[in-house]
Image: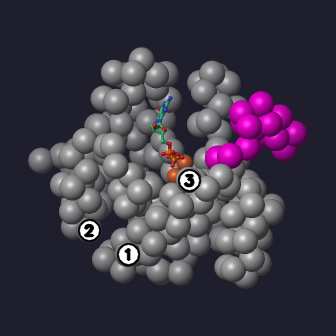
Amino acid sequence: MEIHEIRKKLKKELDKGRYEHTKGVMYTAGCLAMAHGYSVEDAMLAGLLHDCAKCIPNDEKIALCEKYHILIRPVEYENPYLLHARLGAFLAEKNYGVSDPLILHAIKVHTTGEPDMSLLDKIIYIADYIEPGRKNAPDLERIRRIAFLDLNLCMAEILRDTLEYLSGRGGAIDSTTQRTYEFYRQYLR
Ligand code: DGI
Ligand code: FE
Ligand code: FE
């Protein structure tokens, strides 16, 4: 599928705000790829598709995962929005014709991360957090600067803030998010 076809299809699948966010992540991922020596094209494609499953209603997310035998863990039954990452990777392949396993993996882990992520995984995880449309995260100015200097430190900072935010809100914490932080905290200064 050509990139402009993917954009056209996504524009229909996503609500307006999510499509704007998607473009922000796409361009930010491209910039991070320039800074850290990765394929700008691949990073932009992964950024473009990372939330392709986000606007599917939660009950439908669960139904689709069951239909296609995509693993649903208990924490995901309780918080079905977490499924948009794994389901998104599946749909990126099935409905948008992406076959690059590195791109599909970056989409799959973009919400919780995982220990020892690839360069592209980190670019997408971080771009999702710092894109220009994001406004609420604490310390965003500093985290944005670090993103262009040190990806591992940036992962640690984002994960720390995310876990703090989730525990303050009383949200169920996915054990993967916790494990990702345990891995990246070694990079904190
Ligand atoms: O899809 P987006 O909103 O662009 O971004 P995302 O896929 O990174 O989702 C962000 C949200 O996910 C953010 O509010 C933090 C939340 N999140 C990350 N890890 C966990 C989590 N939520 C829960 N309940 N548990 C987690 O471990
Ligand atoms: Fe997402
Ligand atoms: Fe996102």
Q: Nearer the viewer, residue 51 or 46?
A: 51
Q: Earlier in the sequence, mark 2 or mark 1?
A: 1
Q: Quadrant of residue 130?
A: bottom left
Residue at the front extreme? Answer: 16
Q: Is mark 3 within 8 Å of ligand 1?
A: no
Q: Work out whether residue 89 can be spotted.
A: no
Amino acid type, residue under disc 1 in the picture = Cys
Q: Which residue is mark 1?
A: 31
Q: Nearer the viewer, residue 50 or 113?
A: 50
Q: Secondary structure at mark 2?
A: loop
The image shows residue 139 at horizontal and vertical percentages of: 21, 46
Q: Quadrant of residue 63?
A: top right
Between marks 3 and 2 in the image, the one whose residue lies nearer the viewer: 3
Q: Which mark is residue 17?
A: 3
Q: Which residue is mark 2?
A: 148
Q: Is mark 1 within 8 Å of ligand 3?
A: no
Label 1, residues with CA under 10 Å away: few <14, some 14-19, many ≥20: some
Whole-angstrom CA distance, mark 3 to mark 2, is 25 Å
Amino acid type, residue under disc 3 in the picture = Gly
Q: Quadrant of the N terminus?
A: bottom right
The image shows residue 50 at horizontal and vertical percentages of: 58, 58
Magenta range is 54-71
Label 2, residues with CA under 10 Å away: few <14, some 14-19, many ≥20: some
Please tell me which residue is depicted at 74% across the width and 37% down the height of the picture.
57
Amino acid type, residue under disc 2 in the picture = Phe
Whole-angstrom CA distance, mark 3 to mark 1, is 21 Å
